[in-house]
Image: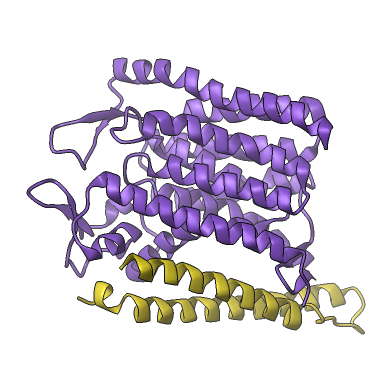
Chain colours: A yellow, B purple
Amino acid sequence: MRIGLFGFLFGMWVLILLGGGIVVVVLGPISISGYGEMDWLLSSGIKAVIAIILVITWILILSKLKNWIFRKEIHP
Amino acid sequence: MTELIIPAIISCFIAFFTVYVATPPLIKYLQNRNLTVKDMNKKEEVMVVRPGGPAIILGIITSEIVLYAFFQLNEILAVIITSFLGFLIGYVDDRKVMGGWFKPVALAFAAIPIIALGAYGSDLAFPLFGSVQIPALYLAIVVLMIPITGNTINSIDVLNGVASGFMTIASFSLSIALFVMQNYEIALVSLPLGFVSLAFYKFHKIPSKIFPGDSGALTLGAMYGAIAIVGHVEIVAAVALLPAVINSFLFLSSVKRIVEHRQIKGKPVEHDKEFRLVATNDKTAPVTLVRLILAGGPMTEKQVGYAIFKLAIFSGILAIITAFLMGVKI
């Protein structure tokens, strides 16, 4: 059982590393121009929306991983 | 590097011995005022005093003031004020039972000193892939970090010695990671957190003589979150905290709302005849880290505590590996 917990920890760590890569590759290059002072606000807004989507995706994957590793314990 | 050794030794010494010396009189004072709660995991009617937060914050403030005398960094002031606000919020909750939303919202305000003192960066660094500039989004991370770390440590404070022992392991892992990343001054700022936790563990370990209470747990969590931000080690800090994050994640994903533990009716864990801890089959009870550890069979409180410490050591190692990976670019 506790091997499952170590596996879940390791899975979370790998997801953090992969998620970091996606954030740097997807969010990093986003830059809006042509709207004057609104450029900063627009690019921040778009980055925030994408970041929230990534976090939700991360939580959903984590939930699936949790159910897969602990299906016996959570649903006896 | 050598000029850091003396401040490090003095601050760690003060952090450890302030808590070590201040806790016994605090225990007596709390006993005299009858500020006790029942230890639910003991067969006999054992009453334990709380909160230990005042001794913990005293150790943090004295040791960090010593460091400030050496370095005069805004980051140190930010850590001191944020930790103190975390303590005040926890102390209010210790004295008067507040709603489920009180602590997260109030702890968000505890992040204001970090912003006001400009003790934060604007980019988020990831291992292997480099960093990303997110000035506006980073402000949101600063505000969210303290409630997350504060409540995460508070939620793992369920058994004798677990919160302080877990914090000792996580904060020393964070300090090592900061040294690996050559962020020496913030590594020094983080060391007292480990020594304060270690000194408090002496009195909190099974059988507990004192509980940290919300004031203790939120102080430790708020300081940890503040160090993560001022040291620009948010990801490493999150990795070192993973077992506690799992606990909060399991709890929230099973309860599906922000709620105080005392408001949950279902019991995730109960006791067998020998008063060992056993996971229940109660479907209304939240899934927690302790419940998953116990899924393999009954265990004593001490065994469960050690199982959590093993997970903390594992995630601490992952955090140090993450710190090494920060210097590697794909």
**Which residue is located at x 47 percent, y 67 percent?**
A9
When asked about the image quadrant of residue B286, the answer is: bottom left
Q: Nearer the viewer, residue A24 or B171?
A: B171
Above-or-below relation of B215 to B282: above
Q: Which quadrant is the N terminus of chain A positioned in?
A: bottom left
**Residue A28 visible (yes or no):** yes
Above-or-below relation of B27 to A25: above
**Which residue is located at x 37 percent, y 68 percent?**
A3
In x, y percent, where is residue A43? 79, 78
When asked about the image quadrant of residue B136, the answer is: bottom right
In x, y percent, where is residue A47? 72, 77
Q: Which quadrant is the C terminus of chain A positioned in?
A: bottom left
Q: Nearer the viewer, residue B18 or B322?
A: B322
Q: Report whether A35 appears left or right of A17.
A: right
In x, y percent, where is residue B201? 43, 34
Q: How many marks?
A: 0
Q: Report whether B259 appears left or right of B54.
A: left
Q: Nearer the viewer, residue B217 or A10?
A: A10
**Which residue is located at x 22 percent, y 53 percent?**
B299
Q: Report whether B35 appears left or right of A15.
A: left
Q: Report whether B155 appears left or right of A46.
A: left
**Residue B100 visible (yes or no):** no
In x, y percent, where is residue B106? 53, 47
When asked about the image quadrant of residue B138, the answer is: bottom right
